[in-house]
Image (cartoon, rainbow, N blue to C red):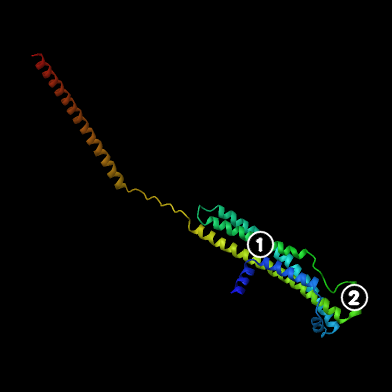
Amino acid sequence: MMNLFKIMFEEILPFFSFLRNKHKKLKKIKTVDVSQEIIKEYSILSIEKLHHRLSEEHERASTIDEKTTKFTLGLSVSLTILSAASGTLAKLLPDNNLNFMIIFLCGLSSIFMLIAGIISLGALKTLPKYGYGTKHEILAEQQGTNHIANALFLQEEINIIRHLRNESAYQCLRNGFFLLLLALIIVTFLIRIPSEVKPVSQPIPVERIEKKAVQEKTAGIVDNQVKPDKAKSLSTERSDNKANSADAKSRAAD
C-alpha cells in the first residue's frame, strides 16, 4: 500500500521526486568512490570498448540535454499560453457555479507547465563530465582500464540524473495537459448547455385579444350605468334627511 501511495505521489508531483533523487545521486558521486567490484566488472571489456562506451555516454548526455531544452521548453511555453487563454474564456462564460473550477484548473495547469519549463531550463546548467580532458588522458595512460571503467560508471550516473530531469519535465507537462483538457471539456459543456434558459414568448391569439376588448367594453358600460344609479340614490337619501330634519323642527316649535 505504501508503494502505491509513493507511486501516486511521484506521478502527481514529479518535481519533488526529481529533486530528492538528484540530491542522492550527486551526493553519492561526490562522496563515495566507485567500488572495486564495479571496476572489476567493467574491466571485463577491452580498453577499446570502454573508450567506445564512454564516447556513447557523452553523446547520450548531449542528446538528452538538447531534447529537454528544445522540445520540453517550447511545448511548455505554448501550452502555458493556451492555458491562459482558456482561463480568459472561462471568465467570459455566463454566471455558473463551475466557473471557479474552470479558472482553478487552468491556473493549476499553467503552474505545472511552468514548472516543466523551469526543470527543462536546468539542462542549461553544466553537470560534471567524466572521461574528458588532459588529466583523464594522463590517468588513463597510468592506470589503464581501471580509470576508464571508473570514469564510465560515473558518467552513467550523471546521465541518470539527466534522464530523471527529462522524465520529470514530461510528467509535469502531462499533468498540465490533462488539467487543461479537463477544463476545456467543462467549458465546452457549459457553452453547449447555458446556465440560464429564458422561455420564448408565445404570440397572443387574435381571439383572446378580441375577447379581452369585449370584456373591457362591457365593464365600462356597467360602470356607466351604476354611477347614475348611485348618484340618484344619494340625492334621494339627502332629500329624505332634509325632510326629516324639517319635521323635527316643526314638532319642536309646537
Q: Which residue is mark 1?
A: 113
Q: Which residue is mark 2?
A: 137
Depicted 81 relative to depicted 129: above or below:
above
Q: Is residue 222 left or right of residue 80?
A: left
Q: Position of residue 22 (x, y in %)?
A: 73, 69
**The C terminus lies in which quarter of the figure?**
top left
Label 2 with label 1: CB-CB less than 8 Å: no
**Which quadrant is the N terminus positioned in?**
bottom right
- Asked which quadrant contains residue 149, the reply is bottom right
Which image quarter: residue 227? top left
State the residue at coordinates (59%, 56%). Answer: 87
Residue at the (59%, 54%) spot, across then down: 88
Residue 58 lies, in percent from the top left, at: 81, 73
Which type of secondary structure does the marked residue at label 2 adopt? Answer: helix
User: Residue extending furthest left?
Assistant: 254
Q: Position of residue 123 (x, y in %)?
A: 76, 65
Q: Residue at x 71, y 61 (%)?
A: 118
As displayed, is residue 58 above or below residue 210? Answer: below
Q: Residues within 10 Å of mark 2 (few under 14, many from 20)?
A: some
Query: Residue 82: x percent and y percent?
Result: 63, 59
Residue closer to the observer: 56 or 18: 18
Classed neighbour count for the residue bearing mark 1: other residues with Cα under 10 Å, few (<14), some (14–19), many (≥20): many
Of tags 2 and 1, which is closer to the observer?
2
Task: State the SS at label 1.
Answer: helix
Question: In the rendered structure, which amino acid carries the disc numbered 1?
Answer: Met
The disc labelled 2 sits on which kind of residue? Glu
Foreground of the two, 17 or 222:
17
Residue at 76% in and 67% down: 66
